Image: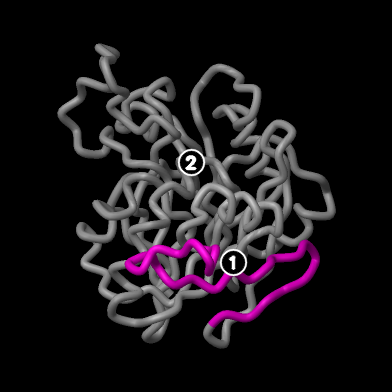
Amino acid sequence: MKVTFLGTGTSTGIPLIGSNHPVCRSSDYKDKRLRSSVLIQWKDYSYVIDTGPDFRQQMLKSKCNKIDGVLYTHEHSDHTSGIDDLRAFCFKQGEIPIYAHERVIDNLFKRFEYIFNNEKKYAGAPILKPIKVINDKKFNISNLNITPISYMHAKLQVFGYRFNDFAYLTDLKTINDMEINKLDNLEVLVLNCIRIEPHYSHLNLKEALSLIKLIKPKKTYLTHISHLLGFHKEVEKNLPESVFLSYDGLKIDL
């Protein structure tokens, strides 16, 4: 299995529009972050977690020419607003399945009525097949069992996903022990970490490192990062030995 980090930034990306913060002005490519998303590939299959506003740009950079499905974590725009750019894949492939909580599917139906409402559907819209993800119920994609992991983003429920020994959790603030137990024996964990100071709906660095100690993965890559976490090189050299900052374009093999 190969994982490509398409984007590793928080909802504003880095650089933040109009900001003169030193990290936003950095010339280091690892400090330039599109909105968070990953491409997961095995055998001849390619799946994406989330399609944010940078999705088109991310797909062009990745040179990915086929998408077998999309898994959505939640409905916020930095994770969903690029959904229309699935149309390019649909033109070649036809219908693409999307997997999400029922609440998220309902939200997408309202926001993108021209895609999902057959009576009002635009002729050039992507052709998508929504499939509901239910907590505590594994589902199968391309002969691989996926375990949904449920947690809270402030007061909003979010799904992370476990693929074999790899798990991707973003926009997490609190998680209960039952869900943590679903994350045992991980080879790689991807976990959000927005900044140094506490945040009302995201893990900060201290909280992320504490959760990593509970889960005990072999390796962890932090994502959904804001400029307020600091410069990539400076932050990473002070992390525990098995914890790393992800960056746009990073590829890992499992």
Q: Residue, x 46% and y 35% (percent of image)?
A: 239
User: What is the number of the mark on residue 77?
Assistant: 2
Where the N terminus falls, by quadrant? bottom left
Dominant SS in magenta: loop
Asked if residue 151 is among those painted magenta in the image, a careful observer would answer: no
At label 1, counting other C-alpha atoms closer than 10 Å, the crowd grade (few under 14, some 14-19, many 20 or more) is many
Where the C terminus falls, by quadrant? bottom left
Q: Residue, x 20% and y 24% (percent of image)?
A: 26
Q: Residue, x 29% and y 76% (percent of image)?
A: 91
User: What is the number of the mark on residue 134?
Assistant: none
**Based on the displayed image, in which of its 4 quarters is residue 208 positioned?**
top right
Say what amino acid the circle numbered 2 marks.
Ser
Instruction: Tell which residue pokes out farthest to the right in this image.
Output: 178
Residue 9 is situated, as x and y percent measured from the top left of the image, at: 39, 37
Residue under pointer 1: 99
Residue 108 is situated, as x and y percent measured from the top left of the image, at: 56, 53
Residue nearer the viewer, 122 or 126: 122
Which span is picked out in magenta? 116-141
Determine whether 82 is above or below 142 in the image: above
Say what amino acid the circle numbered 1 marks.
Tyr
**Based on the displayed image, in which of its 4 quarters is residue 92 positioned?**
bottom left
Disc nearer the start of the sequence (1/2): 2
Q: Residue, x 58% and y 82% (percent of image)?
A: 144
Residue 32 is situated, as x and y percent measured from the top left of the image, at: 26, 35
- Classify residue 224 as left or right of residue 153: left
